[in-house]
Image (spheres, rainbow, N blue to C red):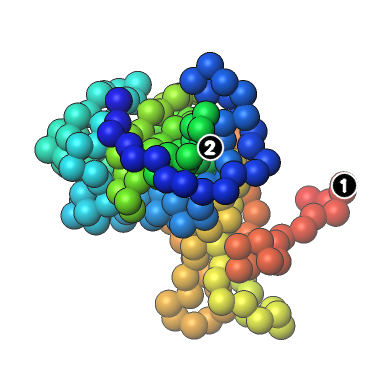
Amino acid sequence: CFNLTAQDEKTTDLVGYGGGQYEVFKTGGQESIELWFKWMELHVSEDLDGILELAHDEIYIEAPEATLNGKSALKDWLTATFSNGDITVEHRWAVPLRFVNEDGSVNPGDWIVNDYVVNYKTDDNVTIDDSEANVYIVNDKVRYIKIFTFKKETLQTKRVTFSVDLSNNKESYSNVSVFGSFNNWCASCDSLTDDDKDGIYIGTFDVPVGELQYKFTLDNQSIEEQFEAGTK
């Protein structure tokens, strides 16, 4: 239960259901989505101080692996998580909502529903979590998170080096990456580099053992590798 002070706002086009009533949500703010995505990016970069800066002093998290109450518990859990592996995140979609009371006043803060996939890589394995989060953000702080995991699997991994020769490419681009079944077809997750400037871009990544499908892409799928049916 949160202590909230309702705000007077003009409410139109209400949708949804909550608290025993219909039509109780309005669209929230895009800035809350951006703050939540920043929260997740800080997990990828393992920026513990940055995460704690965005966390409410009384943050409460309900997840399949743990229930965390307060910043101290969050700090301890993240410290252990970061020491054991690396995280990547692919957001599928996210929606911000604000709850409207029966008298028309609007509760402060936004609820966010976010569907995403997390890859947690250790030395020899990757754990893939297909999840959804319900998040409450108020006063630019993450106050509450509840995580639902739809599917979770752990796979053995191997180090694989990808390379693509773009020395004859005439298109302009600023980023080269590889995406495929190993990273949930995330075009922005695994970038390649050309350190010796010979036009050949290379990157080495942990991928699950077994069949591998992938493509090379420029500028996060602005241009991507294409194949004709029947060719090898």
**Residue drawn where x is 44% and y is 24% of the image:** 148
Please state, as top left, top right, bottom left or bottom right, where the N terminus lies in the image: top left
**Camera sees residue 189:** no
Q: Secondary structure at mark 1?
A: loop
**Residue drawn where x is 47% and y is 46% of the image:** 8
Kindly identify which residue carries mark 2.
Answer: 104
- In this rendering, the label closer to the viewer, 1 or 2: 2
Residue 74 is left or right of residue 97, and the answer is: left
Q: Amino acid at mark 1?
A: Gly
Q: Name the quadrant containing residue 163.
A: bottom right
* Up/down of 141 relative to 152, above or below: below
* Up/down of 111 relative to 19, above or below: below
Residue 123 is left or right of residue 100, and the answer is: left
Q: Secondary structure at mark 2?
A: loop
Q: Tell me where residue 214 appears, x and y as whole percent.
A: 63, 49
Q: Tell me where residue 174 appears, x and y as whole percent.
A: 56, 76
Q: Tell me where residue 100 appears, x and y as whole percent.
A: 51, 36
Residue 111 is left or right of residue 226, and the answer is: left
**Residue drawn where x is 34% and y is 25% of the image:** 63
How far apart marks 1 and 2 lie (CA) works out to: 61 Å
* Up/down of 128 relative to 92, above or below: above
Which of 173 and 130 lies nearest the eye of the viewer? Answer: 130
Kindly identify which residue carries mark 1.
Answer: 230
